[in-house]
Amino acid sequence: MKNFLGILFLFYGQALLAQEQLPEVLTFKEYLAYVKQFHPVARQAGLKLSMAEAELLRARGGFDPKIEVDYDRKVFKNTEYYDILNSTFKIPTWYGIELKANFEQNQGIYLNPERTVPTDGLFSAGISVDVGQGMFINKRMASLRSAKIYREQSVAARDLMVNEVLYNAALAYFDWLRVYNEMIIYEGFLENASERFKGIEQNARLGEIPAIDTVEARISVQSRTLDLEQARVDLVKERLDLSNFLWLDNNTPVELQPNIIPEVGILPNIDKALNIPAVITPGVIPENHPRLRSMELSLRALEVNRRLMANRLLPAINLEYNFLTQKPDQLQSFYRENYKAGVSFSFPLFLRKERGELRLANFRIQDAELDLKLNERQLENKILAAFQQLESYSIQTQMAGEMVKNYNLMLAAEERKMSFGESSLFLINTREIRLIEARLKQNEILNKFLYAKAMLFRDLGIVPDED
C-alpha cells in the first residue's frame, strides 16, 4: 500500500510539473490591458491630469479672499511716538472688481495727522474697480482661463502618451509573434528532415540507395537545426523586449516566462483589440483626435494671452470708494458724507513694449495655426497611406497563402515520385527550401500587415478600452 501511494504521488507530481510547463497563451488584448494599466509611462500619463488639476487649483487661488494686517509701533525714552494698526479684508471678483473692508486704529504723540482716527478706531467698506486695463481681462483672469484650457489639454496629452506606449508595445508583440512563428516553421521542417534522414539511413544500410545520400540528408538536418537555434535565440531577444512593457501594480517589472506563447490566430481579433472602428473613411481624421485637440487647445491659450496683451494698450485706471463709520454693526451709520475715495491713472506714452508684446502674441497664433494645418494634412496622408498598405498586404497575404499551398503540393508530389524511385533527395530538398522560403515570406507579410494596423491605430489616436 505504501509503495502504491508513492507511485501515485510520483505520477501526479510529474503530471503537475508537466502541467506547469504547458504553453499558455498571452492574448494580444490581455497584453495591451496590462500595458495600459501598469506600464510606468501609462501611469505618468495619468499624472498629467493630476498636475493640470493642481495647476487649476493654483489659478483659482488668485480669487481667494485675503486678510492683511499691518501693525507698526515706536516707543523711545518712555514716549510713544506712534502705534498704528491697519487691517484689511479683500475679496477679489471677476471683471477687475475687488470688495474691501478695513479697520484702522492709530495713536501717538508724533502720529501723522492724516492717520488720525477716533479712539475706538475707524471702519471702512468699499469697492475697487479697474475701468481700463483689467476690467474685462487681467493676469488673474487669464491665468484661470489658461489653467482650465491646460486641464482639457492634459487629457489629450495623456491619451497621446498612452497611445504611443501602446503602439510601441504592439510592435514588440508582433515581433515576438513573428519570431515564434518562424520557430514553429523550423521545428516542423526539422522534424520532417529528421524523419527523412532516418528513412534514408535505413535504406542505405539495406543497400537500396547509395550511402552518399545520407550525407545530404544529414546536411539538411544540420541546416534546419541551425535555423531553429537561431530562431530560438531571436525568440529569447524578442521575449525580453516584450518584457519591457510588462509591469505589476507595485511598479515591479515582469519577465515573460518561456512557456508563455503569443496568440497565433490574432488576425480575427486585431481590430477589436486595438479598438479600431469597423467603418473608417480613408484619409479622414476622426473627431477629437488627441493630437489635433491638444493643438487646438494650445491655440485657445494663445488667444487668451493675445487678449491680455491687447488689453494692456488701454490706460490703467483704478477707481476706489469706501464708506467710513465708527459703528460697523449699524447699517444706518454708513453715510454718504463719510467716505474715502480715490482714482489712479497711468499710461505709457509710446506703448512700445505693449505693442511689441501684442505683435509677438499675434505671430505665435499665426505660427500655431500653420502648425495645426500642417499636422492635419500629415495625419490625413498617414491614415490614407495606412489604408493603402493594409489593402496591399491583404492581397499579398492571399497570394502568399496560395504560394504556400502550391509549394506544399509540389513537395508532396516530389516525395511521392521518390517513393516510386523517379526522383532524388536533391529535388526534395530544393522543393522544401522553396516551401520554407514561402512560409517565411507569408509570416513576414503577416508581420507587415500587423505593423500597418498598429500604424493606423497610432495615426487615429485611439486609446483602447481596458475591458
Image: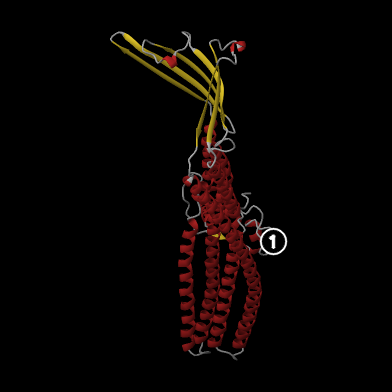
Using a 10 Å C-alpha cutoff, classify the residue at mark 1 as few (fewer than 14 neighbours), some (14 to 19) or many (20 or more): few
On the question of residue 27 being in view, the answer is no
| Closer to us: 189 or 241 | 241
Taking 259 as reference, is 332 left or right?
right
Kindly give the residue lying farthest to the right in the view shown. Answer: 279
* Res 97 → quadrant: top right
Q: Which residue is mark 1?
A: 280
Q: Position of residue 245 (x, y in %)?
A: 50, 54
Q: Position of residue 95 (x, y in %)?
A: 59, 33
| Closer to us: 399 or 86 | 86
The residue under the point 52% across, 85% down is: 203
| Above or below, comparing residue 429 to residue 43 in the picture | below
| Above or below, comparing residue 431 to residue 33 in the picture | below
Q: Position of residue 254 (x, y in %)?
A: 48, 52
Q: Secondary structure at mark 1?
A: loop
- Residue type indicated by callout 1: Ile
Kindly give the residue lying farthest to the left in the view shown. Answer: 77
* Res 27 → quadrant: bottom right
Taking 378 as reference, is 68 left or right?
left
Q: How is the image coloured?
A: secondary structure
Labels in figure, total: 1
Q: Position of residue 228 (x, y in %)?
A: 49, 71
The residue under the point 51% across, 41% down is: 51
| Above or below, comparing residue 89 to residue 410 in the picture | above
The residue under the point 53% across, 87% down is: 426
On the question of residue 185 being in view, the answer is yes
| Closer to us: 358 or 300 | 358
